[in-house]
Amino acid sequence: MTRARIEADAALELIARHSAWVDAGSPDVAPFDADCLTLFDTDLAPVTVSETSLAGARLIRCDLSGATFDRCDFSAAMLTDCILRGTRFTACRFRKAELMGSDAREAVFVGSSMTRVDLSGADLRHADLSGCDLGWAWLTNTDLRFASLDRVNLDGARLVRTRLFSARRFALGQLDRTIITDVTVDEAAAGPPASGTPALDGLRVQADREGPG
């Protein structure tokens, strides 16, 4: 299959039109129209975007590798099965966004608000999630091996069959309401699955030592 490609100038124009569409109404209730960013099986040339709303955008099986988004809003956006390798999202907002099945290896999400994001089946190996809020996020079958988890909030998150491993420990947030079921914490993800907060002891800096991992 030949994939469409959008060069940087055209991509920025589409993003600007979408942001104006968001400003004109709510992407949660407004009908989708030509100004709503909706792309399938498309490669976007790397762009740099700051303080722009992509809320409600629909990017399915698209390649955004190498792009930079700073303080952008992806709330309720769909980035399903996207390629996000090396993409930078600094202090962005992903509330209720859908990133299922996305390849986000080595992506940067530092300081992003990702409450209730769906990362089921996503590959986040070597990604930087430092300082992210993943409260009530879905992390089912998510690969987080070698990801940086410094100061990540996982309150209420669902870690089900999640793959976790790191050579260091992190100051994870509160885990009392986190669901942890059948996770693996070895490099090859071949070890016996474990459940409950003790399963993360090999990753977590204990309370009396909490601080940067």
Image: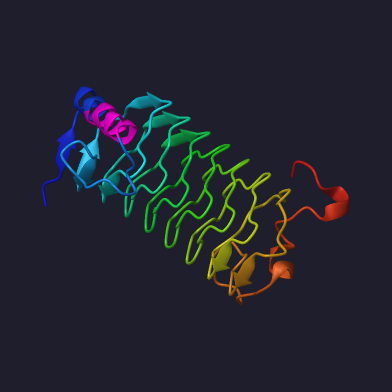
Indicate the quadrant containing the C terminus: top left, top right, bottom left or bottom right: top right
Q: Nearer the viewer, residue 55 or 124?
A: 55
- Residue 169, position in %: x, y? 72, 51
Q: Quadrant of residue 4?
A: top left
Using residue 86 as the reference point, say whether residue 62 is left or right of it: left
Using residue 30 as the reference point, say whether residue 66 is left or right of it: right
- Residue 51, position in %: x, y? 43, 26
Q: Quadrant of residue 101?
A: bottom left
- Vertical order, 162 against 69 (above or below): below
Give the magenta part as a residue range: 14-24
Residue at the image position 39 percent from the left and 54 percent from the top:
98
- Residue found farthest to the right: 208
**Does the segment drawn in magenta span residue 19?**
yes
- Residue 203, position in %: x, y? 70, 57
**Does the segment drawn in magenta span residue 148?**
no
- Residue found farthest to the top: 9
**What secondary structure do most residues of the magenta stretch adopt?**
helix
Q: Nearer the viewer, residue 159 or 167?
A: 159
Residue at the image position 40 percent from the left and 41 percent from the top:
74
- Residue found farthest to the left: 2
- Vertical order, 77 against 185 (above or below): above
Residue at the image position 28 percent from the left and 29 percent from the top:
20
Q: How many labels, in total?
A: 0
Residue at the image position 57 percent from the left and 51 percent from the top:
134
Q: How is the image coloured?
A: rainbow
- Residue 106, position in %: x, y? 47, 42
Using residue 140 as the reference point, say whether residue 24 is left or right of it: left
Using residue 169 as the reference point, say whether residue 183 is left or right of it: left
- Vertical order, 72 against 130 (above or below): above
